[in-house]
Amino acid sequence: MIFAPVPGRAGVKSVPATRLAADGACGGACLVVEEDVLTIEIEEVGTYALMWTPTEAGGAVGYTIEDGVLADAGGVPEALALAAGFAFTEGIIDRREDIAHMSVCPDRPDVLRMRLADPAGAVVRRRDVVVNSSCGICGGRERVREHLAASCRVGDALRLSVTDFAPLREAMRRQQEIFNSTGGAHGAAIFDAALRLVATAEDLGRHNALDKAIGQHFLAGGDFAGSGVFISSRISYEMVAKSVRAGFELIAAISAPSSMAIETADRFGITLCGFVRDEGAKLYSHPHRIATD
């Protein structure tokens, strides 16, 4: 099987495939979402191997506490964004200043090294693990209970109308280039109190897409207060847990939530909406943020 890179397109590969139909079959090439491994080595903390979609087009160089993001192109390269977002939503770091240095290995672009300003003070709940594309928070019930033990309820500044969902969804969809080409990537879009998109990301894994978007905004010095997030996937516990860490006041998703996702959103004051589509949405918790008329 030959997978070919697509010039000028990150995160996708071309592969031969046969299209089957009732009237016969025909061969040709199609685009599929790329899956690879990003190894994040956090000095004196642990090593985390994430199955991800390497979607950045510009080269990631690194990050320093003095200079901020260092890159061959503008913006926040997604290897840096994913590493920072993952460390933040894991609770390993709380502020940008907690990261002293990040760098992508010049000879191994699939390895990113991070050094913390105070590694001894980091809260580490798991070390040396592989995080696959469907599992953002893996472990037993005790691990889940510990994950948000020190977290607080989110703020209460965001207000919007049910009619705001459609333009937010369409704005996110326009940014989903990989999904539009392959049908195989999840998207996440962070919006502020003025309903402007401030960070968007795609990945094979829904939790990676969310971590990438959070990491972009985090490294850019963005303010999470009064913000929400739109996601293209179902809403499981880990998606809500990451949203609690970021302080999102609202989660809107195209698909369904789980019972634990609803319970966690309710506990931390998050407005949770599922099945956000043309015909409307389902509202599961804290409805006061949404005007329905």
Image (cartoon, helix red, strand yellow):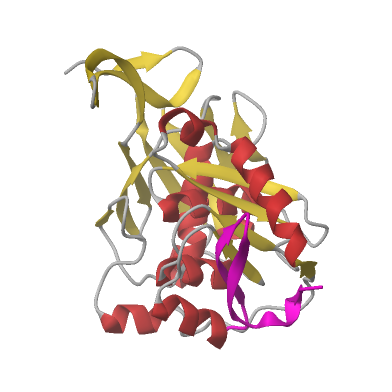
Where does the image place residue 101, in percent across and percent down from the top left? 53, 46
Q: Residue at x 49, y 64 (%)?
A: 89
Q: Residue at (53%, 57%) from the top-left corner?
A: 254
Q: Which of the 4 image quarters holds residue 182?
A: top left
Report x, y in % for residue 76: 61, 38
Residue at the far left in the pictured view: 1
Q: Which residue reaches farthest front? A: 23
Which residue is found at the position 55% from the left and 43% from the top?
A: 201
Q: Quadrant of the N terminus?
A: top left
- In the figure, is residue 25 to the left or right of 38? left
The magenta segment: 268-293
Which residue lies at the image location 34% right of the left edge and 72% below the top edge?
A: 125
Q: Does 174 appear above or below 95? A: above
Q: Is residue 161 left or right of residue 26?
A: right
Q: Report if residue 85 lies within the magenta region.
A: no
Depth check, front residue: 257 or 8: 257
Question: Which of the pair 105/210 is nearer the observer?
Answer: 210
Residue 13 sits in quarter: top left
Q: 231 or 20: nearer the eye?
A: 20
